[in-house]
Image: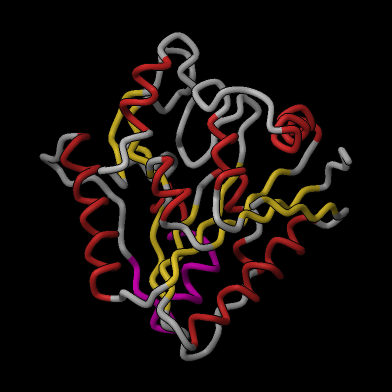
């Protein structure tokens, strides 16, 4: 189910929504998985409840130890991260180890999530997501020339995380690890989707209409999630 909030202050509204959602972490454990890029833009405005039972990690990651590329290292530079550490929030780092392959890296990130869910069977998984002008979301990039490869990588019900090399020309960061579509639609309890700015007009319109195949526009999967809430400054109703 997808709901939408159109506002001229999208960063503030996204922060308010996520702050409200995190209140549940005082009663139930919460695993908060964050996207990088534009979805970082409102994090410093998010309130972290006192006595929160909160664990934070990344929804998708770039296979790099460069602080300007790796999403978790980027997160570590934010005020949100500093405040979270001060409040005792647990962090699950997503930084490649020296001798780790991309596939081993993805399996380790998957194991972290599986372990958290086993330890917190009553827990809630909350995510933030952006959408790119090409229709990607959560590190899942379009595969226009190879729908079968897309389905193999991202639609396997047995996988929560996958490591892959993005199609040539699709991104300057080709080696990635990201959650799968079954994870988004079957595991995530709440998703805050953030899309703002004139460059996102066409994809927001397409998302709201539900046009396109998932291998063309991976963001289409958002419409199949349990509780996805889009915050945008684009009025396409």
Q: Where is residue 213 in the image (x, y as percent from the top left)?
A: 57, 23
Q: In which quarter of the image is residue 115?
A: bottom left
Q: Eyeballing the image, is 66 above or below 39?
A: above
Query: Does residue 149 appear anywhere in the picture?
Result: yes
Residues 14 and 160: in front is 160
Q: Eyeballing the image, is 123 above or below 218?
A: below
Residue at left 39%, top 23%?
150
Residue at left 61%, top 33%?
132
Q: Position of residue 56 (x, y in %)?
A: 41, 66
Q: Eyeballing the image, is 57 above or below 235?
A: below
Q: Start and end of the magenta stretch?
A: 76-91
Residues 89 and 146: in front is 146
Tell me: 188 left or right of 208.
Answer: left
Q: Where is residue 208 in the image (x, y as percent from the top left)?
A: 74, 38
Tell me: 191 left or right of 153.
Answer: right
Residue at left 52%, top 89%?
50
Residue at left 40%, top 12%?
146
Does the stretch in magenta take in 194?
Answer: no
Q: Residue furthest top?
A: 145
Tell me: 32 left or right of 65.
Answer: right
Q: Position of residue 211 (x, y in %)?
A: 68, 26
Query: Does residue 64 appear anywhere in the picture?
Result: no
């Amino acid at each position: 189910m997808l709901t939408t909030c159109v506002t001229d202050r999208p960063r503030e509204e996204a922060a308010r929504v996520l702050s409200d959602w995190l209140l549940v972490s005082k009663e139930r454990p919460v695993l908060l998985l964050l996207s990088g890029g534009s979805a970082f833009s409102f994090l410093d405005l998010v309130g972290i409840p006192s006595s929160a039972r909160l664990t934070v990690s990344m929804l998708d990651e770039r296979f790099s130890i460069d602080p300007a590329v790796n999403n978790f290292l980027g997160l570590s530079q934010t005020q949100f991260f500093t405040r979270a550490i001060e409040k005792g929030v647990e962090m699950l780092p997503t930084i490649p180890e020296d001798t780790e392959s991309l596939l081993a890296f993805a399996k380790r990130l998957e194991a972290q999530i599986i372990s958290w869910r086993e330890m917190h069977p009553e827990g809630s998984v909350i995510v933030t997501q952006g959408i790119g002008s090409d229709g990607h979301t959560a590190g899942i990039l379009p595969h226009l020339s190879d729908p079968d490869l897309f389905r193999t990588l991202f639609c396997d019900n047995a996988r929560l995380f996958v490591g892959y090399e993005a199609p040539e020309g699709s991104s300057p960061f080709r080696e990635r690890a990201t959650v799968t579509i079954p994870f988004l639609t079957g595991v995530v309890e709440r998703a805050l989707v953030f899309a703002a700015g004139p460059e996102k007009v066409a994809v927001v319109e397409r998302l709201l209409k539900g046009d396109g195949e998932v291998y063309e526009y991976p963001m289409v999967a958002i419409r199949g999630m349990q509780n996805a809430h889009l915050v945008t400054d684009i009025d396409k109703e």
